Every structure is written in C-alpha cells, then in structure tokens.
Amino acid sequence: MRDARIELLQQMPVFGGVRADILEFVIDLCPIVSVAADGFFFREDEPGDAMFVLETGSVAVLKLWQGQDHVLQTLTVGDCFGEMAVMDHCPRSASVRAILDASAIRISSADLYQVYAQDLKQFALIQMNMGREVCRRLRDADRRLFSAKMGAPEADEGRNFYS
C-alpha cells in the first residue's frame, strides 16, 4: 500500500521532481482520512492547516451561495484539494464533500515543516510546485470568469479546475 501511495504522489504536479525517499518520509508522517459518502472532509470558512490527496472515491468541491451549496468541481483519485489553506493559512474557501466513500492522504503544514527540517531543497520544490498549481488554477478561473463575462459558451465547459 505504501508503494501505491508513493506512486500516486509521484504522478501529481505538486510532488513533481520530489525524490522517492522524501515521498516515503511524507507518507510515513501522514494519516489516511476516510469519509463516508455525503460526509465532509472540511467545510467552507473552517480553519485549515492541511491538504488532501484523494486515494479512493470521489468528492465534490462546493461553494455556499445564498444558503445553498453549488458544485464547483468533481475530483477523483489522484486529485488534491485544500492546498490553499496550507499556503496562506486562511479559512477554507470552499467545502469538500464525499460523493462516494472516499479516503485521502492528509498532509498538514506541520508535516511539511518536517520535510523542511529534513531537506530544505525538497521542501522548496514542493512549495514551488504548490505555488505553480495554485497559479494554474487561478489562470483557469480568470479564463472562465472572463469567458462568462463576455457571454462565451465555453465559460461553463472549462477544464478540470482542481486537477
């Protein structure tokens, strides 16, 4: 199972180029969180200090608007979520609810700090990769927002926003 988790991380942009020994170190630190269908990994506006890598199942990223949750995106195995809170230490910007029973690797700020203490260069690589991923998502959101403002039909089609 450990090897499968390392392989999962190696396929993700956030962990691109990170050495296998550091990924093993991360896997050994991080718990697996399981959430039953319709349960929440976290809710919008809650404090957050961890990101998650979806190992099984699928989840919906939800934004609350006028008392009702609206689906922003559906995520599947190998997708990550929650990294913004790890980077900016602000409350969660959206909720994540399990569509099917789901499990995810929970990587906290404290876990990443241990990577920092172990290997500064590998920590910096993870941080740069996280920054690139957040920027990619921001560019996609900008494109979708502009398309919507211009009334373009592709605004709703969009690429997968969270993977």
Image: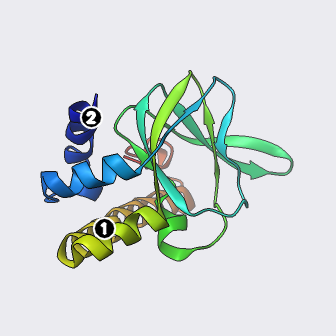
Quarter of the image holding residue 151?
bottom right
- Against 38, residue 25 (above or below) is below
Residue drawn at x 47%, y 25% as measured from the top left = 57
Tag 1 residue: 115
**Callout 1 environment at 10 Å: few (<14), some (14 to 19), or many (20+)?**
many
- Taking 128 as reference, is 145 left or right? right
- Looking at marks 1 and 2 on the same chain, the residue that comes earlier in the sequence is marked by 2
Tag 2 residue: 2
- Taking 2 as reference, is 140 left or right? right
Q: Position of residue 16 (x, y in %)?
A: 18, 56
Quarter of the image holding residue 121?
bottom left
Q: Is residue 13 visible?
A: no
Residue drawn at x 28%, y 27% as measured from the top left = 1
Residue nearest the observer in this picture, 80 or 161: 80
**What number is the disc on residue 107?**
none
Name the kind of residue labelled 1 in the image: Val
